[in-house]
Image (spheres, rainbow, N blue to C red):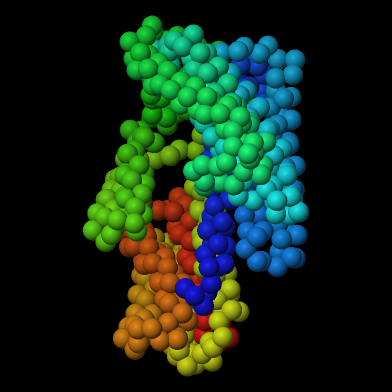
Amino acid sequence: SSAGGSILWDHVWWFFGHPEVYIVLLPAFGIVAGIIATFSGRPVYARKPLFAAVGIVVLLSYMVYGHHMFLTGISLTEREVFTINTEMISIPFGVLMLSFIGTMYKGAVKLTTPMLFALGSVVIFVIGGLSGVFNSSLALDIALRGTYFVVAHFHYVMVGASEFGLFAGIYYWLPKMTGRMYNETLGKTHFILSFVGFNLIFFPMFFLEDMPRRIVTYAASTGWGPANFVATVGAFIFIPSQLLLVYNMGMTLRGPRAPMNPWNSTDREWVSGPSMPHPVGASSHGIGNGLGNGVSHAASESAHEASPLSTRPIILCLGFAVSMAGLAFGLPVIIIGLVILAGGVFGWAWDDYRGRFRLPEEEEGERWPFSKVPKDKLAMWTFLGSEAVLFGVLLGSYAFIRVNFPYWPTPGVLHDINFGTIDTLIVITSSLTAYLGLQSIKAGNRRGLIGWLGATLLLGIISLGVKGTEWYGLITNLVPGSPIGLPVSSYLVTTGIHGAHVLAGLLIMIYLMKRAATGGFSAEHYGSVENFNLYWSFVNCVWLVVFPLFYLL
Ligand SMILES: [Cu+2]
């Protein structure tokens, strides 16, 4: 919107855009860490500092995005803060690199194809990271913006580090996935051509620091010709060489049988057979954990038929992906996506209700620093962390619009303060009833749990009813193109997404009541009720921020 300004979109986009780089990068580095440990025959060096560094990267990743906006007109103070934050992020990444080097130091390094790709990933990332230090400088960025130097930096980080890391993972786990060995010579050829080709494409671009992006041609007098020629040669090496990977993968299906543990890895997935892992409970080996620090365990004794393997989460994700694609392709695609998503959610709940799907707490596996926290609770806290980011973006955008919008209606004009106050009281009460439900089941009182959940459900329905009345009033009174469009739409988007969370909470409550009615919870087993309480408290806390911002200020 014009009143919000294109700068707001820039903020929102890059707030997503920068962390997205690490969303792609960090899984690849997880693979790389494991592969380097396996082929060095040593556990990951400085394991705990490594985890701490990844945590710091995640936190900082939200505080550096402004380095994409140095020339958009944001204030000098903002630009200085983003410069410092961006330069700081090289410290935890340095810890990662030292950990990888330390793992190999004095290790018996075996240069198999997965190891070569892992090392390639690290080397390329170091070059990408060092060039990033230049880009993060406010002064240099003014000169480098929109040039091929940035193109080179970006590809060294994204394509080089992430894709080489993922290739390493493909070769590493191909024997696991197919039960057969790939062709090592072909794999190494793929690596050499990829590594040489990639560097030929992108290294010359560092010297094109004065050539603008997005141009189709240029005069010979610019001197950009030779570097572009080398890059083109590199592209003709790099891209076709990827066919070797596809060919090798296909041929692996007819390749020689793979031994149980071809890499002599201590990682648990290599100890339980060459193909898909058995459901938990079927394995009886003493096995190490994912990062090779050698924690062994006795046979898991849980013998019930429940399996941790379920297709429902994949269906859920597919539905989500399709519905998101619908934002570009139109309403029918959104609806198809939501139907698939609902199928995944309800199917998952149904499996859980029937006791078909259980994820038992396991002894092995890397848990530091969360070894004392149950997995599902940790998952809930992680989810709520992502939710805090989502609502942070919504409320931050609201604050941005509010500051930059010239004629905001005074409190009480757009929204009925009485309605909001009643709603807030309902919300606070529903937090209390949900908590009393949790206390009931902790005392073994199943009927109390059902009763208090019922009361919470009722309060939630009333709260949505109040919101619905307000939404209806706002939408029916809205004149297209009127100057209060922005205050209304920011309200509808924020409370609409909040309302969707309330609706999800209502569905969860119905499910919990149904399970409680059939004896699903007891004084010992109430984890789902506790997790629901966390969720519900969070959703209600969000309202306690939304209410004063939209109604009272
Ligand atoms: Cu960035």
Q: Nearer the viewer, residue 312 or 146?
A: 146
Quadrant of the frame with the C terminus: bottom right
Judged left or right of residue 200, residue 533 is: left
- Identify the residue at horizontal 45%, vertical 50% (top origin): 525
The answer to whether 499 is drawn above or below residue 529 in the figure is below
Residue 29 as seen in the image, left or right of residue 318: right
- Position above or below: 3 against 45: below
Q: As displayed, is residue 163 above or below residue 189?
A: below
Q: Kindly identify the residue that appears in the image at 34 percent across and 38 percent down.
A: 310
Would residue 38 be seen by someone viewing this image from the given angle? yes
Q: Decide if residue 397 is on the left or right side of residue 426.
A: right
Q: Is residue 78 above or below residue 528?
A: below
Residue 356 rendering spot, x and y as whole percentages: 31, 40
Observer-nearest of 127 and 471:
127
Q: Report x, y in % for residue 287.
A: 54, 21
> Image quarter for residue 475?
bottom left
Q: Position of residue 364 (x, y in %)?
A: 55, 30
As drawn, the residue found furthest toward the top would be: 256
Q: Relative to 51, is 282 on the left or the right?
A: left
> Where does the image place residue 290, in percent across and percent down from the top left?
56, 28
Taking depth in this image into account, of 236 and 253 the one nearest to the observer is 236
**How many marks do you count on the picture?**
0
Residue at x-position 43% and y-position 72%: 493
Task: Give the residue at x 62% y 63%.
Answer: 72
Decide if residue 63 is in sight here.
no
